[in-house]
Image (cartoon, helix red, strand yellow):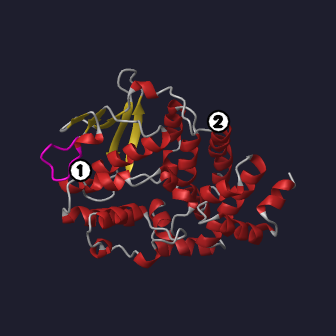
Amino acid sequence: MNAALRVLDRYQIQSDGVFERTDIDRTRLKDKEYRVSLRQIIDVLNNIAQQRWHPELPYDIGRNLHISDYGLYGYAVLSSTRYRDTVDFAQRFHYLAAPTAEMSFDFDKDNPGWEFEPVSVIEQSPDFYSFLTNLQAGIFASLHQDVIGQDFQCNLLELRYPRDSYYTIPAHAADVIKFSAEKNRYSVPPKWMDQRLELGNRMTFQQIVQICEKELSELLSRDEGRVSGKVRKALVQSLSFGANMELISRQIGLTSRTLRRHLKRENTTFSDIVDSTRSELALRYLRDTELSIQEIAYVLGFSDSASFVRAFRRWTGKTPKHYRVGF
């Protein structure tokens, strides 16, 4: 959301109207604890798309999203030491990124790349389809440069929409750009597949993968069959484990009012489940990994280490450092 506002500001575009019919409190957007739903994000993007302010606007918005915006998922991707490992992780745990597009990786040895399709959350006009497609292309460009380095360049970008669409892609987005393609595809030069990533840390990456495979699956099995269990699972599958109630209720097929009623019957609340999920993950990270206090605060969606320490003291009566020393 903030990435879109930054780009609109750079284009000197007044952005007040983009929040119409979204129920978003714009005054809280800079608050890192404030969460908006995927549907709200899509509604804002649709409002922007309808204005036709600039044909390359969605690509620029995507380029302003970075790996640090993706919580645990992003931290794991940044910790990978080989691009091939990054791809494997991204495909297995893609749900952690609260994606606006479905995607899969084609390991064609001569032309590997990401095949993607914007999520069908609302009926998409041709303008909005090309808007979301270009947004994702921009996200790919930004994340690949974050992970691989500024030397990365897409060699072939294939797009399903026609060349004469209003929203289009800048020529520098790839060496070759093809329109009216059979599928959307963001190709990756084969040389990068086994390239060592300089920012990676294999130990950290392995620890986070282990968390995703074992600790998270164990956490998700809690309260299986109950609505509270479905909420816990949806929280883990949402960006930074901090999605709001509206988004979670949509994900599990209920209205927020109905969800609140179900949770009351199970003697819990949405905020209680959020709190307990964060608490249990914090304990696991401190006990089973070597992630720093700052790193744990980051992947759990806290605004800073101090906020995490205060929450942890409330949960356990101890500081994270004193708890870890006990192990």
The outermost residue toward the top is 110
Report crowding for label 2: few under 14, some 14 to 19, many 20 or more residues within 10 A (C-alpha): some
Residue 202 disc label: 2
The outermost residue toward the right is 326
User: Height in image: 109 above or below 75?
Assistant: above
Pointer 2 or 1: first along the chain: 1
Q: Residue at x 36, y 64 (%)?
A: 6
Q: Residue at x 66, y 42 (%)?
A: 204
As shown in the figure, which amino acid type bears the numbered disc 2?
A: Arg
* 165 within the magenta span: yes
Q: Quadrant of residue 270?
A: bottom right
Which residue is under mark 1? 130
As shown in the figure, which amino acid type bears the numbered disc 1?
A: Ser
Residue 230 x, y percent position in the rendering = 57, 59
* Stretch in magenta: 160-170
Query: Does residue 125 appear in the picture of this structure?
Result: no
User: Real-space Cα distance between discs 2 and 1?
Assistant: 37 Å
Q: Quadrant of residue 178?
A: top left
Nearest the viewer among 296 and 250 is 296
Left or right, residue 148 beside residue 124? right
Residue 164 x, y percent position in the rendering = 12, 46
Nearest the viewer among 100 and 69 is 69
* 278 within the magenta span: no
Residue 89 x, y percent position in the rendering = 54, 38
